[in-house]
Image: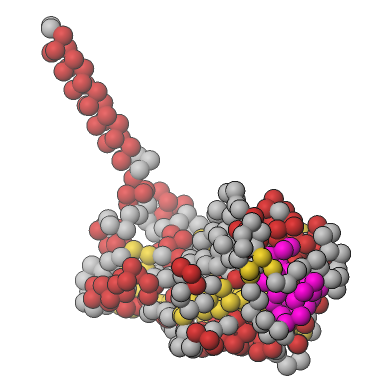
Amino acid sequence: MNRTVRRTAVLLLLLLLALLVRATWIQGPGAGALADNDHNRRFALRRYARPLGDIYAGGQPLTGSEHTGSGPLAYQRTYADGPLYAPVTGYDSQLYGSTLLERLYRGDLDGTDTRMQSPLDVLTKSPGPPGAVMTTIDPAVQRAGFAALSGASGGAVALDPASGAVLAMVSSPSYDPGLISGGPGAAAAWKKLSADRGRAMANLALREPVAPGSAFKLVTAAAALEDGLYPSVDTPTRSPLPYTLPGTRTPLPNEDASAPCRNATLRTALRYSCNNVFANVAHDLGQPKMLAMARKFGFDEPRQDFPVRAATSVYPTSAMTESSLALTGIGQFDVTATPLQMAMVSAAIVNDGRLAAPYLVSEVTDHGGRPVLSVPRGGTSQVISPQTAEQLRSAMETVVGKGSGAAARVPGAEVGGKTGTAQRGVGNSGNPYAWFTAYGRKGDRQVAVAVWIRDSAAARSEVSGGRLAAPVAARMMTAALNH
């Protein structure tokens, strides 16, 4: 046998072996993945042959199943108040697969997870009775946030600071997942929703981190107090005015040119949102200390799953110029955050410096309502000392009681907050982002919230966290504390 024939034979043998390995994998380890693939027609026929289990909030089902006839896809998903809860449930579509909780728990909801199957079901590879997913969402808080954001584009999150339970997760504008569940109109609805890169289905509470602006000054203040740069929120700082960004000739203006920001205390600086103070604090502390504090609050966490994955909120890790470092102290340059992240900041402050990992699902039950999975929580970490948390709460109360956060007041409750108005676009050419993060306490109840407004009908001169975002936070806190 000559060399060419021998090489050809070896090559063909290797190809045959590769084919056999691939076929064996498909029939063995890969069989489950292929069976559950959204594009597998058999998966759809099996999944929609009977009703699915439901996702719940406050004891009420957010989802349902509608009998569509005698065809192979006998049932399709329905949604109660679809636009209100779409950021929580996601969608389940006969044509386009599923997202969020619908996807993460689809095995429990269609009975194919082993938690829902009897031993006989497992042996015969038959689905068991579908289960149910219990969320931590408080419908009253969810409705309050959604109604308050109506007409604007943005997101909001409310947390129970002690446990980390997500009480509300709002995105506006929203969409009705029932329109794409199935049926003759699903394709047209999907095409409409997919326009503009699917922006109509974006989850603005979790998936679009942007500059938090002055709301981030809480993190900067926490770093200054924990480091001992300033021992108290009432100690005068070393903050010149006008303040020139280090290494440049560029002055950094304050929003209110008449505010008493020269050498202001941290309390006064938070009340009047003095850029010169917090830019100087960040520069004096240096990047390593600022980065360490931001990470304690949850920034730069690449896998923030609760169990839905949120986009990573970022404090820059690469080398920065002195001027860029100063800008991070006021939540600009490359600092980005989601409403979830900024709600976590307020949650840690009101919880005596302890940050409880957020969670959205409390348990999964079988068809009889018996718990089959108590979802493990992520635990609690001490972000800042109780003394620092107490001082920050005192300063945040001043922001609401005497400063720009007055619109967040809740009658009969202790409320502390921080406004933010973040630059947007090249050279601040776009309308700013409006932010507000806060906590509220009343009796034995407490809540932490964050609201971000991307676009609204307000004129550019009227865009601020105090005017636009604080009233949304007030309505959500009122619902949480008085419900």
Taking the view exactly as shown, the residue that stands out farthest to the bottom is 411
How many labels sit on residues? 0
Front residue of 388 and 61: 388
Tell me where the magenta segment starts and ends, as one range: 259-281
Residue at figure coordinates x 61%, y 60% from the top left: 248
For the C terminus, the quadrant is bottom right
Question: Residue 301: x, y in percent?
Answer: 59, 55
Question: Residue 39: x, y in percent?
Answer: 28, 57
Residue 192 is at least partly visible in this image = yes
Front residue of 258 and 96: 258
Magenta stretch: dominant SS? helix
Examine the image and state in which quarter residue 74 appears: bottom left
Find out whether residue 261 is within the magenta segment: yes
Question: Residue 291: x, y in percent?
Answer: 67, 54
Front residue of 453 and 365: 453
Find out whether residue 60 is within the magenta segment: no
Residue at figure coordinates x 76%, y 91% from the top left: 412
347 relative position to 154: left or right = right
Residue at figure coordinates x 38%, y 72% from the top left: 199
Q: Residue 29, relative to residue 480: is it above or below?
A: above
